[in-house]
Image (cartoon, helix red, strand yellow):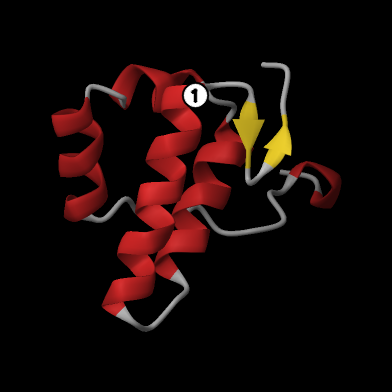
Amino acid sequence: MSPALRPLRKREDMPDFVRDALDRSGLRAAYDARPPYQRNDYLLWINKVKRESTKYKHLARMLEELEVGGVYMGMKWNG
């Protein structure tokens, strides 16, 4: 792969608690419909913090944005 085509960030793994929350909330399809960079950014945002309480706070915000639609990381998004 040429350097220009390599991803800038590594692909984040989806933790089980995020997968479970998406399935329980019925928002998995909304998550999957987002562009790959957004899905990865959400996971990075959740995975990078150390405190469990902050992880769940970020998860709740992601779920809220997926439910409302038209929002990505607190910004208007027309997807």
Res. 19 image quadrant: top left
Q: Is residue 74 left or right of residue 17?
A: right
Q: Residue furthest right?
A: 4
* Above or below 48: residue 23: above
Q: What element carries label 1?
A: helix
Q: What residue type is labelled 1?
A: Val
User: Label 1 crowding class (10 Å Cα cut-off): few <14, some 14-19, many 20+?
Assistant: few
Check disc 1 and report the residue beneath it.
68
Where does the C terminus fall, quadrant-wise?
top right
Residue plotted at (43% across, 58% down): 58
* Above or below 53: residue 19: above
Residue plotted at (80% across, 45% down): 2
Q: Name the spot of residue 50 as percent of width and height, x first.
A: 38, 83
* Above or below 68: residue 59: below
* Above or below 44: residue 63: above
Residue plotted at (47% across, 73% down): 48
Q: In this view, does 6 lie to the left or right of 64?
A: right
